Amino acid sequence: MLLIEIKPDKCDFCGVCVGVCPEDAIELKEATIKISEELCTNCAKCVWCCPIEVLVFRKDKIQQLKASTFK
Ligand code: SF4
Ligand code: SF4
C-alpha cells in the first residue's frame, strides 16, 4: 500500500527526491511526478528530503493500515 501522497501542483521538479529514493521508485518526466506502488517501500526518505513538502504521508491510508493490523 502506497502511503505517500504527491501534491503535484506544488512540485518544482528539482529532482532531489529522485536522487534520494533507494528504490528508484520516483519518476520525474516532463513536469510530472509519479511514485511506483510496486517499487516504493514507504521508507519516507523522499518525504523528509522534499524542501517544499510536496510529498506527504497519507493519514487516511495509515489509519486504514493500523485498523487492519490491530483488529
Ligand atoms: S524534492 Fe519535492 S519539489 Fe523536488 S522534485 Fe521531489 S517532490 Fe518535487
Ligand atoms: S517512500 Fe522511500 S521508497 Fe518510496 S518513493 Fe519515497 S524514498 Fe522512494
Image (tube, rainbow, N blue to C red):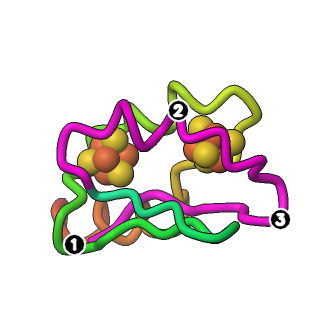
Q: Earlier in the sequence, mark 3 or mark 1?
A: 3
Q: Measure how far apart labels 2 and 3 are at the Cα level.
A: 17 Å
The three-letter amino acid code for the residue at tag 3 is Asp
Q: Which residues are magenta?
A: 1-24
Q: Which residue is mark 3?
A: 9
Name, please, the residue furthest toward the front. Answer: 30
Q: Position of residue 42 (x, y in %)?
A: 29, 49
Can you say whether 63 is above or below 36 in the image?
Answer: above
Q: From the top left corner, tell me how far across and down residue 25 is, in percent.
A: 29, 58
Q: Is residue 44 left or right of residue 49?
A: left
* Image mark for residue 16: 2
Label 2 sits on a secondary structure element that is helix
> Mark 1: which amino acid?
Ser
**Label 3, label 1: how far apart the Cα atoms are:** 32 Å
Q: Secondary structure at mark 3?
A: loop
The mark nearer the N terminus, 1 or 2, is 2
